[in-house]
Image (tube, rainbow, N blue to C red):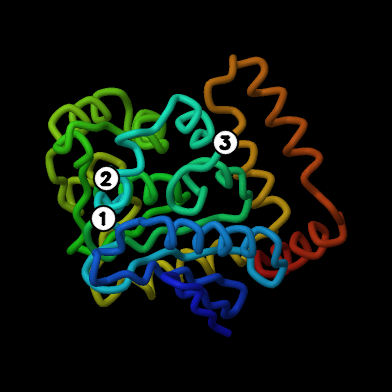
Amino acid sequence: RGEAMGKVVYEKRDRIGYITLNRPEALNALDDELNDALWEVWTDFHADETVDVAIVTGAGKAFCSGADLKSFLPKWEHATMLDARKNAARGIGGGITRGQHRITKPIIAAVNGFAIGGGFELALACDIRIASEKAKFGVFEVRHGLHQGDGGIVRLVAIAGVGTALDLTLTGREVSAEEAYRLGLVNKVVPHEELLPTAESWARMILANGQQAIRSAKETILEVIGRPLDDALRLEAVNGYSSVGDFREVAERLRKFLGKSR
């Protein structure tokens, strides 16, 4: 099944939701139409129990080149503080950076090319990042006199640490796929033609697990960030021991495991 929602193509196959940013002529820059279409896609992905994992990629040579500056800059040039406050509830990328970031189903970014500016923020908002050897990353906002405002700093610090966050943000330099891997920004780098098959293999590994446990684990990981140790340990214990919806699934998985190990 596939559906074109304006500037996004959304397909569902074998419990995977394939989300393709489809503005190749603009390097998949995020304008209002693309953001609105992505908001609808994420809302559907969250609610549709026929899909358990999403793979996000871009059409053409870019993953996402960030906010569409032609429409983004004029909108904020005469903005008020109230506009900024309203914006805080709904980040770019259809809210996956902020606003719909609590979706507990796993999201894989298949980074096929440039992931710069807000596109870097979009990739960082995903749970797993597989990069083509052609992928490029960068905090290009600072080149335009701006800096990240849609989770880029928060997630850079959480994923790669303060040193890397400072390096990439203060310089605005371009980062290759291989360097991104060394910095811990991506999980794997593959030849370009192997990008989607590799992302699908990651998705199938996730799908082989108990989905209630997977969603609880993602929720717990996001919830423990920044908490005091005792609070984090308590939260993990409560969530871990209460994540089983039907113990018959656990018993059946254990039976199969014990059968294989004999």
> Is tag 1's residue or tag 2's residue first in the polypeptide sequence?
1
Q: Nearer the viewer, residue 182 or 56?
A: 56
Q: Nearer the viewer, residue 147 or 125?
A: 147
Q: Position of residue 31 (x, y in %)?
A: 37, 56
In the image, what residue occupies the spot 72% across and 67% down?
49
User: Alpha-carbon distance for marks 1 and 2?
Assistant: 6 Å
Crowding near the residue tagged with mark 3, few <14, some 14–19, many ≥20 C-alpha atoms within 10 Å: few
Helix or strand or loop: what does disc 3 sit on?
helix
Crowding near the residue tagged with mark 2, few <14, some 14–19, many ≥20 C-alpha atoms within 10 Å: many
Kindly give the residue lying farthest to the bottom in the view shown. 1
Pointer 2: what residue?
A: 117
Q: Position of residue 36 (x, y in %)?
A: 50, 58
Kindly give the residue lying farthest to the front in the view shown. 78
Q: Which mark is residue 65?
A: 1
In the image, what residue occupies the spot 24% across and 24% down?
163
Q: Which mark is residue 222?
A: 3
